[in-house]
Amino acid sequence: MTSTVLDVTVMLLCVSASVLALGGVDAGTSTPTPDAQAAADRVVTETATVQTETATDSSAETAAVIDGERGTVHTTLAELLVLSAEYGGDDGDRRQATDTFRETVIETVSDRLGPRVRLDIYGTLDHGATEETRSIAVGDAPPRSADVNTAVVSVPESGAGDRHGAGWRLIVRTW
């Protein structure tokens, strides 16, 4: 009788130990969820430098993106997103320059934040008699089945040029 009780006790201890050991094993496929607030803080404080011009031909006039200025813009990631959303091209060369600038900004921000981070920035531009809503998205949308963390940040307008708006709203989602 004593040996049966001892055998059952040892077996239960072994089963419990194996359950704990297997439960703690990580297959190496899971990564920690990025923190939405930390990602939002990075977007509003981290800076980057981006080119503001493009040329299709070295002898051609370069179409600048921001207020006719050529060169680079060095500012926070959030302000770069606002600038790329505020400025649109009116003609072919300016539109190409604006699109190139926007793509560069999106790529720069995406590279800085990494995977599993989605940014959406929304704002309204006041053109006097009309208003225009603009938005930019950076990163993939989270899967429907994911637990999503969200942070919302207000970003002021750039103040450059003759465009006026009520500011911008930056929505950061991580999963």
Image (cartoon, rainbow, N blue to C red):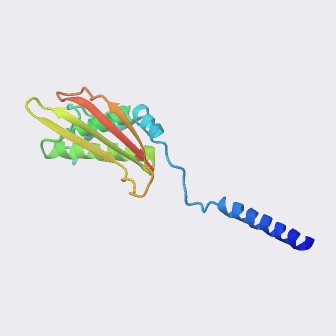
Seen in the picture, residue 24 relative to 15 is either above or below; the reply is: above
Seen in the picture, residue 6 relative to 60 is either above or below; the reply is: below
Image location (x, y in percent) of residue 74: 36, 32
Q: Report which quarter residue 172 is drawn in.
A: top left
Horizontal side, residue 24 vs residue 172: left or right: right
Seen in the picture, residue 69 relative to 10 is either above or below; the reply is: above
Looking at the picture, tell me which residue is in the foreground, 160 or 24: 24
Residue shown at the point (32%, 31%) measured from the top left: 155
Image location (x, y in percent) of residue 118: 38, 47
Kindly give the residue lying farthest to the right in the view shown. 2
Q: Is residue 58 visible?
A: no
Seen in the picture, residue 159 relative to 131 is either above or below; the reply is: above
Question: Quarter holding the N terminus?
Answer: bottom right
Horizontal side, residue 132 vs residue 156: left or right: left
Looking at the picture, tell me which residue is in the foreground, 32 or 83: 32
Q: Report which quarter residue 94 is drawn in.
A: top left
Looking at the picture, tell me which residue is in the foreground, 113 or 166: 166
Kindly give the residue lying farthest to the left in the view shown. 129
Image location (x, y in percent) of residue 27: 60, 63
Residue shown at the point (45%, 48%) measured from the top left: 114
Kindly give the residue lying farthest to the front in the view shown. 1
Residue shown at the point (51%, 49%) measured from the top left: 33
- Total number of numbered discs in the rendering: 0
Residue shown at the point (54%, 50%) measured from the top left: 32
Image location (x, y in percent) of residue 151: 40, 39
Q: Is residue 67 visible?
A: yes
Q: Report which quarter residue 76 is drawn in.
A: top left
